[in-house]
Image (cartoon, helix red, strand yellow):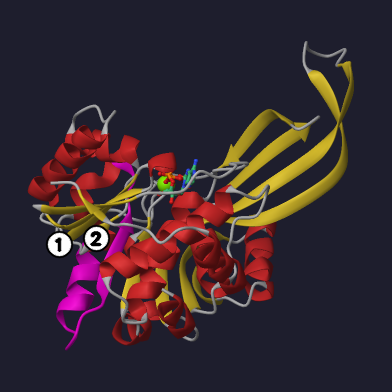
Amino acid sequence: MKRLLGRLAGQKVLIIGDLMLDHYLLGTVERISPEAPVPVVRVEKETHVLGGAGNVARNIAELGGKPVLAGMRGKDIHGQRLKDHCSSAGLATRVLASESRPTTVKTRVMAANQQIVRVDHEDLGQPSDAELDELFELIAEDLESAPVVILSDYGKGLICRPFMDRLWTALQSLKSRPYVLVDPKTVNYDLYTGVDLLTPNTKEAGEGAGMAVNSMESAVLAGQKLFDRLECKHLLVTLGRDGMALFHDRETVSHIPTFARKVFDVTGAGDTVIGTLALGLAAGGSLVDSATLANHAAGIVVGQIGAATASPGQVVDSIDELPEVEVRSLL
Ligand SMILES: Nc1ncnc2c1ncn2[C@@H]1O[C@H](COP(=O)(O)OP(=O)(O)OP(=O)(O)O)[C@@H](O)[C@H]1O
Ligand SMILES: [Mg+2]
């Protein structure tokens, strides 16, 4: 595990997906508005964080990898901010600035550690053909040189049928094609036929399979239905506190458990999983080793307030502290 961790540095991963800016307004409430029965928040602090595909890229950068982040933003103040955050995080970017759509922004107004309201700016429409052409020109070389590609689909419009058609066309012309991983969005399952690996959580796996997932047995059954539906090569169903079910193929499933730990903030764990897994595979790690490493990294992220990434030092500590994972077959 540590040897694989040591090999992550400098490995390239291309992340294509929905770029987002998480915007936080933090303040206090002292009164109800005279205009409507709503609290008045006096803002004391304002922060911006990269979300969506950008968070996947940050996870890869934190582990020493070389993420290349591709997607779209608007030509607006938030788009400029998103660009600035990418450069201060040291991310290489292939970002198209759209004339017609806004940057996806989620503004959360918080007071007394509680969310008062969330305000979304987004346009869920598909990009135009011209925009997609331009994006694929931007990433043409990366598709050739990156051993692993992540599609980080948050259902904000970029990953659509015309996008996938262009992707397969571009990959078909390559001598060796990169391994394609997808963090799926339920409404888009039909787009993922033929990808190498998906990383749904239990809810997404159940929705994709058209069944309820509420036990290990049902998770395995749902996984098999996803194989039948998508003809993927591998599958990793994340099971929250129960860890992961790794499908080497439709009939070979391993369970990678987590260890009891305090959980503070589960948001972003999925981004950590797919980022770490992709980086492990790019470094030549096996599926099971890369997924186990991802399990360690995600465990660190959920155990910290606000932190959305894990560093190599933290992963080493986690490997040292926790008992060695016993990967058990589920079938
Ligand atoms: N309570 C927990 N204890 C330990 N590890 C956890 C816990 N919850 C999540 N994890 C780790 O995070 C991984 C991903 O969690 P989960 O299945 O909740 O993903 P997700 O729903 O996609 O997350 P996200 O909120 O980012 O969308 C798990 O496979 C596990 O490694
Ligand atoms: Mg997720």
Q: Is residue 29 visible?
A: yes
Q: Residue at x 21, y 80 (%)?
A: 177
* Dot 1 amino acid type: Lys
Q: Secondary structure at mark 2?
A: strand
Q: Secondary structure at mark 1?
A: loop
In the image, 122 versus 107, the foreground residue is 107
Numbered range of the magenta stretch? 165-186
* Residue 179 in magenta stretch: yes
From the viewer's perspective, tell me whether residue 246 is left or right of residue 82.
left
Q: In the picture, which quadrant includes the N terminus?
A: bottom left
Magenta stretch: includes residue 58: no
Question: Are discs 1 and 2 less than 8 Å apart at CB?
Answer: yes
The crowding category of the residue bearing disc 1, from other C-alpha atoms within 10 Å (few below 14, some 14 to 19, many at least 20), is: some
Question: Horizontal placement of 105 versus 291: left or right?
Answer: right
Q: Residue 3: x, y in percent? A: 43, 82
- Is disc 1's CB within 8 Å of ligand 1? no
- Which amino acid does the dot numbered 2 rest on? Leu
Viewer-closest of 261 and 185: 261
Give the residue number, with chain letter if any, for mark 1: 233
Q: On the rendered structure, is 85 left or right of 47?
A: left
Tell which circle, 1 or 2, labels the residue nearer the N-terminal end.
Answer: 2
Q: Residue at x 88, y 12 (%)?
A: 34
The number of numbered badges drawn on the structure is 2
Identify whether 26 is placed above or below 156.
above
Question: Which residue, as the protein is rendered here, is positioned at the far front?
Answer: 323
Q: Which mark is residue 197?
A: 2
Query: In the picture shown, does residue 97 fall above or below 3?
Result: above
